[in-house]
Amino acid sequence: MGFDTRNGTGDEPACVNWLAETLGAFHPDKLVNQKVPRKHGKPDSAFVLAVWGEPKLVLNVHIDTVPSGQGWLADPLILRKKADRVIGLGACDIKGAAACILSALLRVKPRNVAILLSGDEEQGSEIMPEVIKAGHLKGIEAAIVCEPTGCQVGKRHRGMLALKAEFSGPGGHSSLADNIEAPLLKAARLADAIGQYGENHLDFGTPPYQGLCTNIGGVNSDGAYNVIPTSASLQFSMRPPPGDDVSRRETDLHDIAAQQGADCQTLVAFEPFATKDIEAFKFLFASHDFVDLPYWTEAAMVSEAGMNAVVFGPGHIEQAHQPEEWVSYAQLEKATALYETALATGLGTGMSK
């Protein structure tokens, strides 16, 4: 069964409805299937939460994907099987984990555990905060957030801060450029100031999280080489390291924008992540390596909500968001075995009661 869950254009609720029906066949004590509206003109997303017993552990997978882009050799929405791998949009990031969890349910009986399959992670992450705010994860102490970690255990990662600045002017013929507002020039000057801020912090933090990963993501306008733009926009971001103050960085960037006369808005402001108690997970991940991750995940949100979290899933990040995205059978089998143990034992004996 294939579903188009490309973030912003696909039908995430349709996929969630199918998943809810599938999970229902495993007789959870509670099943919540809910559609959630999104901002910025995007269609509704959704989530399904299945609960067995009195869960202290939740397994979470996001079901949305990035756009498919160019370079695919066949329809990206149709899964293809090769000798050592499966290929398809989201196979690695991270629908493969959802398939592993469903396979695990065929082999073990869930015990005091919950499964949360949720949308809108790839751009916006509006669903997870709604799940938390509604109290659906109340009483849960620990979370395994599924992302392509190569079946290693992610213990830390950076935060994410993204902003957009807008500039405007009357526009006109470029022969009048010395006397007319120059929105694109202002955007370029702000981009330079933001870039300088990042360069001034290249030594901030400690390995492997030195620097702020400041990025100028896009500068756009309605001008041309002989036309003064009437508008220009700039998008920029940074990834504050674990332990850094995201709100402080946000204030700094807004202050820089204000100095340039920019109308600036925050698009996302997500905290960095660090597992609260690594030892508590070692009974489950005894044979796995605990690693630092280079990318942001919604583990930061569940951690901020008070849960002890790690990031774990099949597939390697190098295959994610790529044409011909794939995940190996070996990775899927390894992840399935781990999910079986997690579903059957809940928090197990190695974690707090």
Image (cartoon, rainbow, N blue to C red):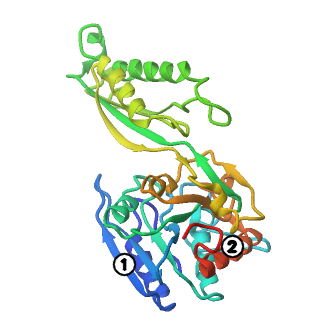
Q: What residue type is labelled 2?
A: Leu
Residue 336 location (% of width, % of height)? 68, 76
Residue 136, relative to residue 203: is it above or below?
below
**In screen coordinates, is 90 left or right of 50?**
right
Q: In which quarter of the image is residue 342?
A: bottom right
Per the rendering, the mark at residue 338 is 2
Which residue occupies 40% across, 83% down?
Answer: 31
Identify the element where label 1 is drawn: strand
Residue 219 seen by the camera? yes
The quarter in which the C terminus is drawn is bottom right
Residue 191, relative to residue 266: is it above or below?
above
Q: Nearer the viewer, residue 292 or 7?
A: 292
Residue 89 seen by the camera? no
**In screen coordinates, is 75 left or right of 232?**
right
Residue 196 location (% of width, % of height)? 50, 18
Q: Quadrant of residue 352?
A: bottom right
